[in-house]
Structures are given as structure tokens and as C-alpha cells.
Image (cartoon, rainbow, N blue to C red):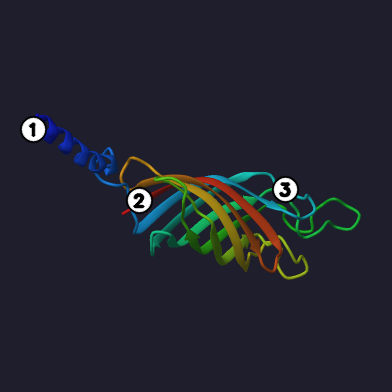
Amino acid sequence: MKKSLLIAALALLSSPVLAATPPEGVAFEPRRGFFTETDIGVFFTVGGENVYSNAQTYLQLGVGYDLTETLSLGAHFGLGSSAQNCFAGYLPGTETCALSDNFTMAFFNASVAYHVRVMDRLFLTPKVVAGYTRLDPAPVNPGEGDPGRAVSAPNAGLGFGVEYATGMDHFSVGADLLARYIIGPNITSFAVFPKVKYTF
């Protein structure tokens, strides 16, 4: 009788402990610290005479650091192109663009992202970005110098993404939507891309 009561008491005492222990024995915590990121997706511009450009490939490489569990700083280089969208206006009486309606856009941006935990491994990642853009050849101001020249201008934008910490240690995957406005040329661009992130 006493032995049965002892076994029952031990079972009751151990139940809360077992219930609080995750299957792997330790609670999951996402890896935070220095990270690198590789992104390949789709890029296009809106506005201009053609309203929107044809979708083109977008490539972005980045590095960053998680300051806290929820706040990250990053630096990114992105490369895309605007195809078949005229921002210089048409030549009089024609539908020929006054400058090239195909141009490359190189972005050098700093970003601040906030991580909102949805589930153990799943996060929403709203962010703000700002930096510098090089457009080659110049898509605006046809009366200012060589039409084949490149121009540079500041940019600012907002992004929204999702990020999932995989079962492979160090690796996260996700997807982002990033909108940026190039100040001066007055061009709005969008990039949509999946991403792979490695945290050291």
C-alpha cells in the first residue's frame, strides 16, 4: 500500500516538469548575431509613360547584425533593371522615349528590421530602408548633358517580410516585398524575393 502511494506521488510531482519540457529537452530560441543574406527575385518600376515596367530579375546581397531579439540592422547591395518604361517623356509627336526606357538600378541601402514572433520559428519582419541609387543610363532630364550618362540619387522605402528559422542550425528562409522611392528622378520601384539567411 505504501509503495503504491509513493509511486503515485512521484508520478504527480513529475507531471508538471515533463509537461514543461519541450520534446528536444530545451526551449527553442532563434539564433541571433552577425548574419549574411542572399536574395534573388523579381523587380519592376511603376509610373512613367508606360505605367509599369516589364518584370526583371533582382539580386540582393546583404550583411547585418541582430542588436536584440527583435531589432536588426543591415547593409545591402541590390541590382535590378527597369525595362520598357519611359520616365523622360516622349519626343514631340511620337511615342519614342526622349531617353532610354531600359536602365539598370543599383541600390546601396541600410535597413532597420523589427522581428514580430508569430510562432516558435516564424516571424514577421517589417523594415525601413534608406540609401543611394545609381541609374545607368540616365532615365530622366533629357536636356542635361550626355544621354548615355549615369545619375545618382538618394532613396527611401518600406518593406514587409516573413522569416522562418529552419531545423538546420544557422539557416533561416523567408520572403520580402520591398518598395523604394528614388528621390529626384521620382521613380518608384518594387522588389519581391525569397531569401536565405545564415546567422553565425
The image quarter containing residue 17 is top left
Q: Nearer the viewer, mark 2 or mark 3?
A: 2
Q: Amino acid at mark 2?
A: Pro
Element class at badge 2: loop
Q: Which residue is mark 3?
A: 84
- Closer to the eye: label 1 or 2: 1
* Disc 3 residue crowd, few under 14, some 14–19, many 20+, Cα 10 Å: many
Place of residue 170 in the rendered image (x, y in percent of width and height, measured from the top left): 32, 48
What amino acid does circle 3 point to? Gln
Question: Mark 2 or mark 1, which is nearer the start of the sequence?
Answer: 1
The amino acid sitting under disc 1 is Lys
Q: Position of residue 120 (x, y in %)?
A: 39, 45
Residue 158 x %, y %? 59, 59
Residue 148 x, y percent position in the rendering: 67, 61
Q: Is residue 140 left or right of residue 5?
A: right
Residue 30 is marked as: 2
Residue that numbered label 1 is attached to = 2
Q: Residue at x 12, y 30 (%)?
A: 4
Query: From this viewpoint, is residue 195 visible?
Result: no
Kindly check if marks 1 and 3 are in contact, taking CB atoms under 8 A apart as contact.
no
